[in-house]
Image (cartoon, helix red, strand yellow):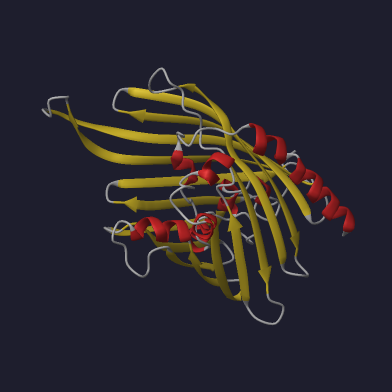
């Protein structure tokens, strides 16, 4: 036990140089990488850094969450972000040996048709915009309770006739103690460089440092989630002169409560203070910042759905399917 905590603490220290040295301006590109890809993620408030059984898609949030228990599952999800904006995500992986696993994933977001106008406000027809990312992932069990993961992303963005390319890395650790129902996760996300920008200025991907904590109750079917995100120093200082310290701090936290009747059924509700604050300025209602999700597992498939609000004009929803694909034998 003490050895696991020492390894976890040492691994977290590896993030500190990146946390302090790679500070960037508040302007970032490829923000679609921060949009949730799974019902569990949305139901937890928008981020999932900690262990969720049988959900391989949360590896998009923390590569250390993909392991032998989720290998062999083909994950698919569809997100209706808002009117005309849609996202699809897929992930699949296999064991490498008794400790390692690999996976390959794809994320794509299409923004629909938009009208183009020249500087004199004369219509020039329509155009489309698309973002996509292809990623390869490898995770390794450092001990029976601690796992590390690394993901390499090739990122592409297109707006009308303009294109941009970038390369980014996710690095994460996950500590899970099933007997105590305790899960701790940390991830450095989207740390990379823009190879080709839309213009001469190359805006870097929106890198971030995130920490997560989850705890299940021993005598009740509930699990509580707390996630801190936006710990990139420049992001954390953003709007610092406009808000009180407490409001600014809450913008970097999400809360989630999960109810699981058994291993086959779950319900979750989450709260994102940043969404609530932002939607309040856009005439949002009492439910702004809240999210709701649920799922069902069968021997051969797992389905899930979640809903939240990113804009006062309508709800956003995601549905997912994970199914067994191949067998559980090692391929190497």
Q: Residue at x 37, y 69 (%)?
A: 287
Residue lying at the far top of the rendered structure: 200
Position above or below: 213 against 11: below
Quarter that holds the C terminus: top right
Q: Is residue 142 visible?
A: no
Quarter where residue 286 is shown: bottom left
Residue lying at the far bottom of the rendered structure: 219
Left or right placement of residue 165 versus residue 74 in this view: left
Left or right placement of residue 299 versus residue 84 in this view: right
Left or right placement of residue 279 versus residue 66 in this view: left
Question: Percent x, y for residue 288?
Answer: 38, 64
Q: Residue at x 44, y 65 (%)?
A: 291
Q: Residue at x 55, y 64 (%)?
A: 255
Position above or below: 104 against 158: below
Q: Residue at x 29, y 27 (%)?
A: 160
Quarter that holds the N terminus: bottom right
């Amino acid at each position: 036990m003490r050895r696991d905590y020492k390894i976890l603490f040492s691994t977290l220290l590896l993030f500190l140089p990146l946390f302090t040295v790679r500070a960037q301006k508040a302007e970032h590109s490829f923000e679609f990488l921060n949009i949730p890809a799974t019902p569990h993620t949305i139901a937890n408030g928008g981020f999932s850094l900690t262990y969720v059984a049988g959900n391989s898609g949360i590896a998009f949030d923390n590569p250390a969450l993909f392991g032998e228990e989720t290998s062999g599952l083909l994950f698919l999800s569809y997100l209706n972000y808002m009117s005309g904006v849609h996202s699809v995500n897929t992930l699949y992986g296999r064991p490498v040996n008794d400790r390692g696993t690999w996976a390959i994933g794809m994320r794509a977001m299409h923004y629909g048709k938009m009208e183009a106008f020249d500087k004199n406000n004369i219509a020039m027809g329509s155009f489309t915009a698309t973002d996509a990312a292809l990623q390869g992932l490898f995770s390794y069990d450092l001990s029976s309770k601690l796992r590390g993961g690394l993901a390499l992303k090739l990122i592409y963005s297109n707006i009308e006739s303009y294109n941009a390319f970038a390369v980014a890395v996710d690095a994460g650790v996950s500590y899970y103690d099933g007997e105590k129902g305790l899960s701790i996760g940390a991830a450095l996300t989207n740390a990379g460089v823009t190879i080709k920008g839309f213009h001469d200025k190359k805006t870097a991907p929106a890198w971030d440092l995130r920490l997560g904590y989850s705890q299940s109750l021993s005598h009740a079917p509930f699990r509580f989630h707390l996630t801190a995100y936006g710990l990139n120093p420049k992001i954390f200082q953003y709007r610092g002169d406009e808000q009180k310290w407490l409001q600014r701090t809450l913008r970097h936290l999400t809360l989630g409560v999960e109810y699981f009747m058994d291993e086959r059924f779950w319900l979750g509700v989450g709260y994102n203070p940043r969404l609530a604050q932002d939607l309040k300025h856009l005439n949002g209602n009492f439910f702004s910042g809240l999210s709701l999700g649920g799922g069902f597992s069968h021997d051969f498939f797992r389905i899930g759905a979640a809903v939240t609000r990113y804009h006062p004009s309508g709800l956003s929803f995601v549905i997912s399917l994970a199914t067994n694909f191949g067998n559980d034998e090692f391929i190497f």
